[in-house]
Image (cartoon, coloured by chain):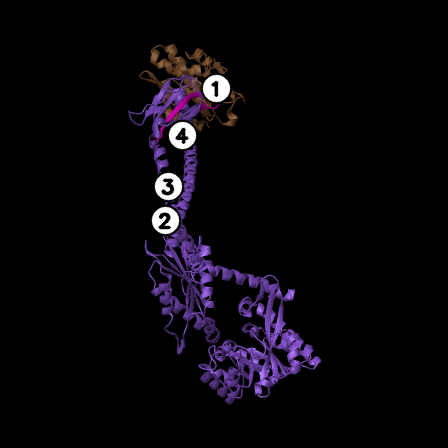
Chain colours: A brown, B purple
Amino acid sequence: MLSRVLIVAWLMPCLAAAQSVQENTLKAAFVYNFALFTEWPKNASNGADSLAVCFNAESEMRDVLSALDGKPVRNMVLKARALSGLNREVVSCNVLFIDRHDRNHWHAVREKLAGAGVLTVTDDEDIGRRGAMIALSLSGSKIVFDIDQSAARQAGLVLSSKLLRLARTVR
Amino acid sequence: MRERRTIELLRGGHSRALGSLVVTGSALLLSSVLLIIFLSMMMRSEWIDDGIVKAKMIAGNSNAALLFGDEKAALEILSSLDSAENVESAALFSADGRELARYQRSDEHEAITPARGQPAGYWFKWKHLDVVEEVRNGDERVGMVSLRFMMRPFYQRLLGHIAVIMAVALGALLMVYLFTSRMRMAVSRAEMQLDFLAYTDPVTSLPNRRAFNMELDSLVESVRNNGGQIGLILLDLDNFKVVNDTMGHQCGDEILRMVANRLTSSLRSVDLVCRMGGDEFVLILMPEEDVVIELDAIAARILELLVEPFRYHEHEFFLTASVGGSLFPADAEDGETLIRKADTAMYSAKQEGKNTFAAFRPEMDKVAQRRLAIEINLRRALERGELVLHYQPQINLADGQISGVEALLRWDHHEMGAISPAEFIPVAEESGLIIEIGKWALQAACGQMRAWCDAGIAPSRVAVNLSTRQVKDASLALDIHTILNQAGLSAQQLELEITEGILMENMHANIRFLQQLRLAGVSLSVDDFGTGYSSLSYLKRFPVNQLKIDRSFVRDLPGDGEAFIIAIISMAHSLGLTVVAEGVETAEQLRFLRDNGCDIAQGYYFALPAAADDVAELLRTRSFPTILS
């Protein structure tokens, strides 16, 4: 099951980078992989056996991220949660995907999240610059990511050195 | 011959040393091979372990890169293998078998591609070691990593080890060789030394009896096969015992060495001189082809060699030898018989009066056989009562009375008939039976004397002959005392006749012994006076009462013997000794002796030696009045 995801993950760039659906699927695979290489503080987990991956219900990524639901991460299971507006609920997430639609809310969301162990991932360049922990972007036909290590650290998250090594930049 | 044995020994030692070297070498080779096999197995498993560890390290580092499909990162990880020099190539594959990244040390190397779904494992081949390891993230298999190691460094290291092992083995072998060859040399030196001792007479350094036997056997064998002749000369020094007894063994040994030197220096190199032991030497003569051995000439030369006196410090010794010779194959069919024939001849030479040579003649064997028969029968003669004493009266020339009788041994063998004392006494002396026989004679004579005393017809004494061998018997003095006591005789009634030989040999001990007898009252008479190595000095030193002029001088009366007998009588009288003449057969002889003052006479003229009963008749009359006329 996982392998199928991965096949897609690196087949995509070759086939059709322009097709946004496939691009989104690939981004979702990245999000999943980020979860694999991230350690959450023990108390931050919203449940002992599940990891909540949250996103705006209006996001273009909604479908592909929902597809991650039920996937295993170590000894836990991913739960995809579509949020209608990024309200207080964001604190109970483990991974929060934010895209350009949330650009205006980002500042407020960020304040809500202050100190909470939530891995913030975005594909928006602007949000990426403003404190998202991992920012996805396109470099030619390839998806690359940048990591804000200090933001992750403030949230009490530990990103695997392997992940850091794969990042295009680490701040 | 000694040299030949030495060479054999050396050759034996050499091949034995080589043999042990081969054994040691094989053992070392075997252990080295086993060590190398063991080492290569160890190295192989280390090599594999190392490969697996490297594969696991790559696998552990590359899971993220595989998950993210990051070729660059994957290549970077593989490139870390650059520092592991034995890695030839490496590749990372996704879970479905697609290659993500590949590393090659150089273009000539090819990364292996595991077949789809190939399990983790290793493949150890001659040229490569391939290791395939799973890349895991948690429990999930996310890809494969494959590494190919080249084997050349493996072999280089193995070769290095083999070289060291072989060098150590060779070094050990060299040390073993040096050590064992030194040991071998010491052992073979010791063996040679032992061998030398075993085949050499320590006194003269001549080959000994054993060496002689071996040499003779091999020569006999060679003559049998190739023809030719062997001469054997056996040499026995006649009076050497006197040297040993009077001068001690050190002097005796020195003189034996001188004899050995004279013998060896006179011989050609092919001839061999051996010392058989005691004062006996043997010469093996091996002539050139077609040369006839002239034993007589060689023996004459040997006797000539001994003529010159032997000097030891200020002493001079005159030695003679009895020499016997025999020839192979003329006289014997084998070496042992050849020695016996030479011995028989030598014995015959001794019988003929010593200082002479006798070549073996077949009739000597008959003499030797008779001698042997005599010796065998003599042992039982006493038990069978075959020995008896005859008595010959001794007449006092002053009054014609019988002054005494001489006891003489007679042997009448039940089959061989009467055997002359001249024949059996020497055999008894040589075999040592004389001690027993002599003691018996003393007892019988004294017993007879007792009987005559009881009958009232006893002469004033009975004379018994004493052998040289008897004098050496420590118990003789006690025996004489006991015998006299048992017979109830006084010592004055016994006269012992001794030979000049007793006086010559072992002088000091014999003087003491004879003095004891004299003190006890026993008369001592010197028998066969004038035939031996007469020296006037011993007459003064020994406590004798009487001289017996040998019958050979009396036989020459009247005529040649006259002056000699007159001289003996006057000398004896001036020394206070009485004189007995034996072998008196005619009235002329008797008259001459009586006229010249001889005290006592015995001989056929008066009476033959006769059995005791017959003598008793004479004793009753007790006188030969006719002699006074």
> What secondary structure do most residues of the magenta stretch adopt?
strand
Mark positioned earlier in the residue sequence (2 or 4) = 4
Alpha-carbon span between mark 4 and mark 1: 48 Å
- Going by the numbered disc 2, the residue's amino acid type is Asn
4 vs 1, front mark: 4
Q: Which residue is mark 3?
A: B166
Question: Taking A4 as reference, is B504 above or below it?
Answer: below
- Is residue B503 shown above or below B53? below
**What residue does disc 2 label?**
B226
The dot on residue A90 is: 1
Comes first in the chain, label 3 or label 4: 4
Q: Are marks 2 and 4 on the same chain?
A: yes
Locate residue B276, reporting x and y percent. Answer: 45, 62
Q: In terms of image quadrants, where is residue B129?
A: top left
Same subunit, tags 2 and 3 = yes
* Residue at the disc numbered 4: B51
Find numbered disc 3 in the image and state the secondary structure of the residue it sits on.
helix
Between label 2 and label 4, give the one nearer the viewer: 2
Q: Which mark is residue B626?
A: none
Disc 4 crowd rating (10 Å Cα; few below 14, some 14-19, many 20+) is many
The chain letter for the residue carrying disc 1 is A
Compare residues B271 and A144 and report the one nearer the observer: B271
In the rendered image, residues at marks 1 and 2 fall on the same chain: no
Cα–Cα gap, marks 1 and 3: 76 Å
Mark 3 or mark 4, whichever is nearer to me: 3
Dividing the picture into quadrants, the one containing residue B613 is bottom right
Q: Which residues are magenta?
A: B136-151
Which one is closest to the eye, mark 2 or mark 3? 2
